[in-house]
Image (cartoon, helix red, strand yellow):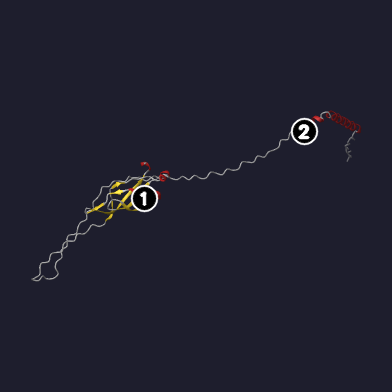
Amino acid sequence: MPSASLAVVRRPHPDMVRVAALSAAITLNLVALLFALRPLAPQIAQAIDTVRVEPIHIIEPPPKVPPPPDMVVKPLTKPLPVTPPLHIPLVHVQKEMPPPTITTPTTEPSQNSKPVDATPATIATPPSIAPGVTSLAYRSSPLRFPAQAIRAHMEGTVVLLVLVDENGKPVQVKIEQSSGYGLLDKSAREQVMSGWQFEPAVIDGHAVKAWARVPVSFALQQL
């Protein structure tokens, strides 16, 4: 077989003269650049000094505002209807009298004995106080609204049990039904005891003591 010759690649050696020339050119350019920038060095330094550094302020977020409390809505209470005191006519209580009792003799009459008269009927005296609770007419019923109750917007009706004597004057007062306010109950009781007058109850033509049911109304609309 014929022998083939292998081609060998030869690398060229660097040109030292060319390298030296390029290095000298670069050096000269650097020296020229330094000389050109030398007059501008103070201006650059002054420009750097004039730059103000603004401080950075960290703004904290505002504190959280607590939520408002829940609103409690109360239902409006309707005032109780107030009825003015009624003037009730005087009622005369008539008590039926029991029939007279006749007693018969228990022994046989003798010949000489005289006839025995029958025992006269006993008439019962009227009671000192009328039974039960009645309604009596008013002679005088002045009523003053307490100033403290007006400022507090209190109103209501007090039902009293009043013991009226033979002259129509109250001698004892009890609270049967409250108005819901102690101030109104106390004022009604004191005013009835001090200044009210009634028509007394009458039994068999005689004035007697009697318990009467008396409503006392305090209404702001009547002021």
Quarter of the rendering containing residue 5: top right
**Quick one: which residue is furthest to the right in this view?**
17
Amino acid residing under circle 1: Glu
- Which label belongs to residue 171? none
Tell me: 214 left or right of 204.
right
69, above or below 30, in the image:
below
Q: How many labels does the image show?
A: 2
- The spot of residue 126 in percent (x, y) is 23, 57
Compare residues 213 and 122 and report the one nearer the observer. Answer: 122
What residue appears at the point 30 percent right and 48 percent down from the top-left corner? 197
* Rendered location of residue 166, percent (x, y): 27, 53
Kindly identify which residue carries mark 2: 49
Query: Which quadrant is the C terminus positioned in?
Result: top left
Q: Which of 63 and 200 is in front in this view?
A: 200
Q: Which of 168 and 65 is in front in this view?
A: 168
Q: Nearer the viewer, mark 2 or mark 1?
A: 1
- For marks 2 and 1, the one nearer the N-term is 2
Type of amino acid at the residue the image marks with label 2: Asp
- Give me the residue at 36% from left, 50% from top: 190
Label 2 secondary element: helix
Q: Is residue 188 left or right of residue 36?
A: left
Tag on residue 190? Answer: 1
Q: What residue lies at 34% left-to-right and 49% top-to-bottom? A: 194
Q: Which residue is drawn at 79% across and 31% down?
A: 46
Using the numbered discs, state the Cα–Cα distance from disc 2 to disc 1 in whole angstroms. Answer: 97 Å
The answer to which quarter of the image holds residue 97 is: bottom left
- Circle 1 SS class: helix
Q: Which of 139 and 152 is in front in this view?
A: 139
